[in-house]
Amino acid sequence: MCEPLMAAEESPLDEPLLVPDIDVEQRGSGGGADDIANMEAHLLLHHDTGASFWRSCLNLSNVISGVGVLSVPYALAQGGWLSLALFAVVGAVCYYTGELIARCMRAGGDGDADAVRSYPDIGQLAFGRPGRKAIGAVMYAELYLVAVSFLILEGDNLDKLLPGTTVGLPGGYVLRGKQLFTLLAAVVILPTTWLRDLCVLAYVSAVGLVASVALTASLVWAGVAEHGFHAAKDANVFSLAGLPTALSLYFVCFAGHGVFPTVYTSMRNNNDFTKVLLASSVLCSLNYALTAVLGYMIYGDDVKSLVTLNLPSGKVYTRIAILTTLITPLAKYALIIQPITTGIEEKLSSSRGSLTRAAISTAVLVSTVVAACTVPFFGYLMSFIGSSLNVTVAVLFPCLSYLMIGEVRRAEAAGIVAILVVGVCVAVLGTYTSLHQIVSTF
């Protein structure tokens, strides 16, 4: 059952999109989703007995596995072969910070009426109301930029699938290429943003796991049938200049921490969360790494920010890869922007009529279309999201919160501080590099 996003007096980031059917007074405040795949965890919750171990593995794998898989070959090309070692380090760090989130959940009085049940709850437990607001602000920014990246993804891939398509408009105007398909995608998405019950879209968005597997299979097919696996044999072993971009994109792959508390509270036995997190992280890491290596070995330094753009036009495997990649953003867009539109409704003190919601969601969609057509650089945008927002949510917040909440031993505290220092460096350098790349393209 889907419930309304929020109670009348609550912030939209204080309530999960899709939640178990429990009493409002017993439900803690929830958070907006953390990355392009975070919404799926909510649709897989068991309302009565809780999710089993394997169901929880599916939930968490669905959270971690997202459209970041499209950019990992490009990340490898930017950082060189040795950056795969850093990919493993990023995965290990994100696994550890996920475990820190679970510890914060336990420290917050697991099982009580006022138990910590969401990421903003952890922020409030650690830093009070400012902590909740800080996490909310970061999540709002991330949700908006992810919505923009969805439109860029749709425009780029549809242009690859249907090259040369043009549409004439009155007055002699002609729409073509990525801008045309970005607008067409927006037209298809628009009615879904007017819905209040988004359960059906949430179920459709669960094809993200299938899309990841389909992409990897398509790369294997492309390598065997067309190019071979030798394009990157003379590639750089390590590129210091491309390292910030590579690290930022690697963080995109693992940053699903905003919804980890939801998966944790949905489990039948949440003491198994660490095992579930480990199994899901390993499986997703293997898929990411395989996709990165295959894409880089086939296309070398010519690999694009979306590896689907390298696939030859007109081939069956190209169509399969692109079509499966396009379904999830179309279904997820409405889920992603709902906390934003509801937040605007509250700020404007508007009545929650259908016309008001439709007008606000339409305005948000139009703004993201303008942004997608203005900054049509998927790789750079994903790098910016990874460095400035994903690193904050996946590394900085969990470490700082645990230092404030948990009983930390001296050796572990030193390790956490070291992770914080590295995280800040990645955030600063990655954000600067991605913004410089975006600005330099104008």
Image (spheres, helix red, strand yellow):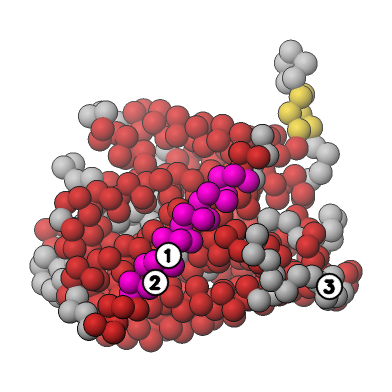
Identify which residue is drawn at 13% across, 74% down.
109
Judge whether residue 271 is colored magenta: no
Q: From mark 2 to mark 3, how far is it between C-alphas?
A: 33 Å
Q: Is residue 115 left or right of residue 60?
A: left
Q: Earlier in the sequence, mark 1 or mark 3?
A: 3
Image position, residue 428 (x, y; %): 46, 54
Magenta highlight: main SS: helix
Picture quadrant of residue 270? bottom left
Residue holding disc 3: 234
User: Can you say which quadrant of the picture contains the C terminus?
Assistant: top right
Picture quadrant of residue 219? bottom right
Q: From mark 2 to mark 1, how far is it between C-alphas?
A: 6 Å
Magenta segment, which residues? Answer: 416-437
Q: Is residue 259 left or right of residue 332?
A: left
Q: Residues within 10 Å of mark 3 (few under 14, many from 20)?
A: few
Q: Nearer the viewer, residue 394 or 367?
A: 394
Q: Nearer the viewer, residue 162 or 388?
A: 388
As helix, strand or loop, the secondary structure at mark 1 comes to: helix
Of the residues shown, which amino acid type is indicated by label 1?
A: Gly
Image position, residue 3 (x, y; %): 28, 53
Q: Is there a contact, CB below 8 Å, between mark 2 and mark 1?
A: yes
Residue 258 shows in this picture = yes
Which disc, if any, is residue 423?
1
